[in-house]
Image: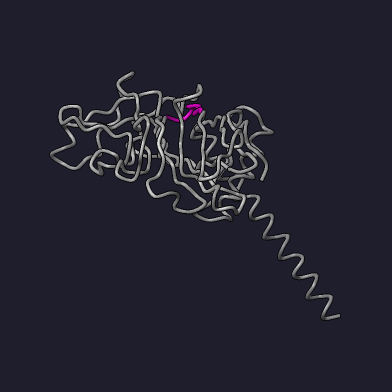
Amino acid sequence: MAKLMDVRCAAREPSCMVTLCLAAVLAAAGGSNAGILVDQTAIYDVFVTEPMQVGTGAENLFSTTLYVVNTTGEAGNDPTGFDGVFFGYSGVAGSLHQHDNPGLGVYTPTSDSSLFATAIDTHFLNELAELMFVVAPFETRGLLPSAEPSDSPSPLGPLAETTFGDRLSGTFALVGGSAGDTWMLAQLVAPSGTTLSFDFAISGALEPGVEGDILATFLIPEPASLSLLGACALALLRRTRKTEVGRSTLITRAWLF
């Protein structure tokens, strides 16, 4: 699959719409594990899942999952470490939606709190107990207010606060090593039209060097673009099926005659 570094242009350029349409078809064909490739090195492929709308629509929020895959087949390269702080790395940046409870002192850079690390919250998908860290996972919050209401159950909802930050980062590794060749790294929630920036390093038991450096961007499409992608994907799938049926008919006729 080609490297999709310029997905951010999709909402404006027809050629990029074709690229994203093909990505949508591949995602539909690949099932729940399919994703959109945003960066690729000799060792790691970095994907985001197809953005899905979350929340009430008050802030037009979409959620996508960031994940990393070791493509070498060498277990020593399975992703276990994330650095978004040192050597100039910044982690994940963009208009990231946050859902916390400052009154109770509950913040959600990780998935520890199921009451607040919900569908409308940006956070890493590991709990703190699963990580050893040089810099603990952290997030910025409160840079802008959010009109999206809390989705925490009563009576916690009224105590929660929704805001926008601009960074999710840290420097940490999985306790006990990797869980396989794929690391489901973070849930990212942002309004449509947001450009997410990725600037971090991934490592395994083997030192990857520059092949662990990830630098990419991804645009959360506008709803109209997502609808167009769906229609385009459906049209291409129908065309493919018609072609397959046509070929099958020709083969059948060849056998009959």
Residue that sits furthest to the bottom in the current view? 256
User: For residue 159, what is the image quadrant?
Assistant: top left
Q: Nearer the viewer, residue 143 or 150?
A: 143
User: For residue 8, what is the image quadrant?
Assistant: top right
Asked if residue 146 lies left or right of residue 17, the reply is left
The x, y position of residue 185, in whole percent, is: 44, 42
Q: How is the image coloured?
A: one colour
Question: Which residue is rendered at x = 16% and y = 37% of the image?
Answer: 156
Indicate whether 54 appears above or below 196.
below
Asked if residue 239 lies left or right of residue 10, the reply is right
- Counting labels gives 0
Residue 194 is one of the magenta-drawn residues: yes
Name the image quarter holding the C terminus.
Answer: bottom right
Residue that sits furthest to the top in the current view? 143
Residue 196 is one of the magenta-drawn residues: yes
Question: Which residue is rendered at x = 21% and y = 33% of the image?
Answer: 106
Residue that sits furthest to the left in the current view? 155
Question: Which residue is rendered at x = 47% and y = 47% of the image?
Answer: 183
User: For residue 157, what is the image quadrant?
Assistant: top left
Asked if residue 135 lies left or right of residue 198, the reply is left
The x, y position of residue 13, in whole percent, is: 65, 28
Q: Which residues are magenta?
A: 191-197
Residue that sits furthest to the front in the current view? 206
The x, y position of residue 77, in whole percent, is: 55, 47
The x, y position of residue 113, in whole percent, is: 25, 41
